[in-house]
Amino acid sequence: MREGIHPEYRKVVFYDTNAETYFVIGSTIETTETIDYEGQEYPLVRLDVSSASHPFYTGKQRNVGTEGRAAQFKRRFGGIGARGK
């Protein structure tokens, strides 16, 4: 391998904010946050979804609103731009 062209490979803590789960995995990802985890300091990366919270891996479905797209639009924007005389 040539020197100076490869990113630094190190242990990184990934934090799934939905499942509140921590994973220590080797990675080259760049981050400015750090965390003290199990007595050592690691770089920290926050995730919205991981295998701990994704419906495919957990078998749980997320609650999705039953309201239609047009009804959502009307609820949000109501009378904005309504044609009135």
Image (cartoon, grey):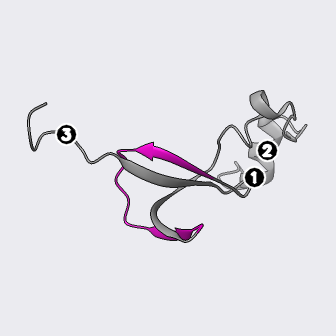
Give the residue displayed 91% in from the left and 37% down from the top.
66
Camera sees residue 85: no
Lower position in the chain sequence, tag 1 or tag 3: 3
Q: Residues within 10 Å of mark 2 (few under 14, many from 20)?
A: few
Viewer-proximal residue, 75 or 62? 62
The answer to if 30 sits in the magenta stretch is yes
Q: Residue 39's spot in the image, x, y percent?
A: 55, 71
Q: Which residue is mark 2?
A: 72
User: Looking at the picture, which amino acid does disc 3 mark?
Assistant: His
- Vertical arrangement, residue 60 with respect to residue 74, above or below: above
**Looking at the picture, does residue 19 appear above or below residue 65?**
below
* CA–CA distance in space, label 1 to label 3: 33 Å
Q: Amino acid at mark 2?
A: Gln
Crowd band around label 3 with a 10 angstrom C-alpha radius: few (<14), some (14–19), many (20+): few
Task: Identify residue for label 3.
Answer: 6
Residue 66 visible in image: yes
Place of residue 37 in the rendered image (x, y in percent of width and height, measured from the top left): 57, 67
Tell me the residue at 44%/44% (across/down).
Answer: 26
What range is drawn magenta here? 23-38
Give the Cα separation between the discs numbered 2 and 3: 48 Å
Q: Residue furthest right?
A: 66
Q: Which residue is mark 1?
A: 19
Could you tell whether 5 is left or right of 81 in the image?
A: left
Mark toward the viewer: 1 or 3: 3
